[in-house]
Image (spheres, grey):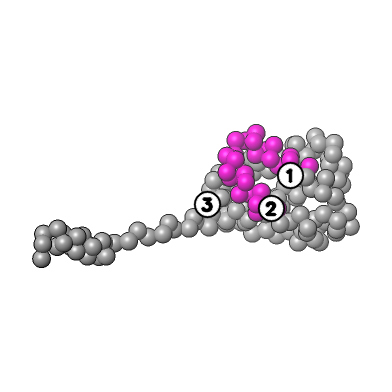
């Protein structure tokens, strides 16, 4: 065999026996939870979020007769669980919690805008914000018009 043909053949065999690269491992279940700073980071977001809601004339009257401490606890639990953290949400379903309130898309959008503003204020990276909002977006039909 000619040396060039032998070299090509050996190179081909080496390529076949070379280890293949493994596909990237999926991110850990709690990746977003950790990106948000864990329980402390989520608590900071929720604290700023509620301050914004309370000052938002578009929706603050919706929370007039609500136990804010309990609601903050539930939102913390919900965000913690949704992002892969160790918490368990102990509240009612979104449909049950919002039944009879007849919330509108504008109400939901104002709520989300306040959440985004809170995340901006505590410097949550935009990529993490998008991931969190993608987790929460499917709740719209469970909340609006109920």
* CB contact under 8 Å: marks 1 and 2: yes
Of the two numbered discs 1 and 2 on the same chain, state the one appearing first in sequence.
1
At 57% from the left and 54% from the top, the residue drawn is 85
At 60% from the left and 35% from the top, the residue drawn is 123
Q: Disc 3 marks which residue?
A: 31
**Main SS of residues in magenta:** helix
C-alpha span from label 3 to label 1: 22 Å
Number of numbered discs: 3
Where's the C terminus, which quadrant?
A: bottom right
In the rendered structure, does residue 58 fall within the stretch colored magenta? Answer: no
User: Quarter of the image holding residue 120?
Assistant: top right
Q: Disc 1 marks which residue?
A: 112
Q: Is residue 79 visible?
A: no
Return the x and y of residue 11 as percentages of the image width and height.
21, 60
Neighbour tally class for label 3: few under 14, some 14-19, many 20 plus, Cα within 10 Å = some
- Decide which of 122, 107 is in the foreground and name it: 107
Of the two numbered discs 2 and 3 on the same chain, state the one appearing first in sequence.
3
Q: Which mark is residue 44?
A: none
The magenta stretch is: 110-137
Q: Disc 2 marks which residue?
A: 136
Return the x and y of residue 108 as percentages of the image width and height.
79, 48
Q: In the picture provided, is 142 more to the left or to the right than 116?
A: right
């Amino acid at each position: 065999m000619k040396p060039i043909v032998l070299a090509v053949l050996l190179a081909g065999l080496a390529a076949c026996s070379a280890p293949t690269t493994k596909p990237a491992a999926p991110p850990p279940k709690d990746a977003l939870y950790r990106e948000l700073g864990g329980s402390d980071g989520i608590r900071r977001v929720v604290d700023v979020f509620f301050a914004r809601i309370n000052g938002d004339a578009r929706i603050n009257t919706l929370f007039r007769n609500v136990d804010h401490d309990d609601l903050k606890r539930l939102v913390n639990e919900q965000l913690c669980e949704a992002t892969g953290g160790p918490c368990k949400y102990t509240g009612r379903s979104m449909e049950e919690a919002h039944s009879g309130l007849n919330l509108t898309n504008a109400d939901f959008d104002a709520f989300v805008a306040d959440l985004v503003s809170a995340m901006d204020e505590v410097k949550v990276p935009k990529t993490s914000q998008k991931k969190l909002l993608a987790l929460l977006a499917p709740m719209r039909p469970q909340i609006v018009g109920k």
